[in-house]
Image (tube, grey):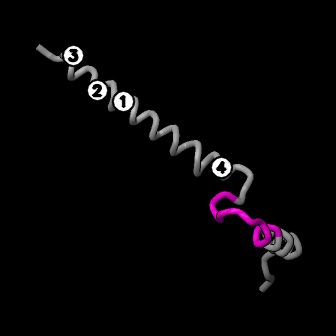
Amino acid sequence: MSSEAPFRPREKLVEKQKYYQNVHKYTHLKGPLDKVTSVAIPLALASTCLFMIGRGIYNMSHGIGKKE
């Protein structure tokens, strides 16, 4: 039985671990693109939802879009 070759060399893994353990940021903001996934996308969803709620309230108060 032959053992499978590692996906990444152990030295690279140890180097990455040391880097991420020494970064003084929150855990979910350590990667280069983590700000996009944990900040920008939720802000975009929240702003879209607020816009749609505001538009719905405006339409209801002015009677726009009612079916006859």
Q: Are marks 2 and 3 in contact (CB under 8 Å)?
A: no
**Magenta residues (range):** 19-29
| Residue 29 in the image: above or below residue 15 | above
Q: Amino acid at mark 2?
A: Gly
From the viewer's perspective, is 27 left or right of 3? left
Question: How far apart are labels 4 and 3 at the CA level?
Answer: 40 Å
Nearer to us in this view, 5 or 36 = 36
- Image quarter hosting the C terminus: top left
Q: Amino acid at mark 4?
A: Lys
Q: Earlier in the sequence, mark 2 or mark 4?
A: 4
Question: How far apart are labels 2 and 3 at the CA level?
Answer: 10 Å
Q: Are marks 2 and 1 in contact (CB under 8 Å)?
A: yes
- Which SS class for mark 1? helix
Q: Amino acid at mark 1?
A: Met
| Residue 37 tag number | none
From the viewer's perspective, is 11 left or right of 47? right
| Residue 3 in the image: above or below residue 13 | below
- Please name which of the two marks, 3 or 1, marks the residue nearer to the observer: 3
What residue do we see at 82% from left, 68% from top?
19
- Image quarter hosting the N terminus: bottom right
Residue 41 in the image, given as x and y percentages of width and height: 55, 43
| Residue 62 tag number | 3
Residue 20 in the image, given as x and y percentages of width and height: 77, 68
Instruction: Report which residue position mark 2 lands on.
Output: 56
Question: How far apart are labels 2 and 4 at the CA level?
Answer: 31 Å
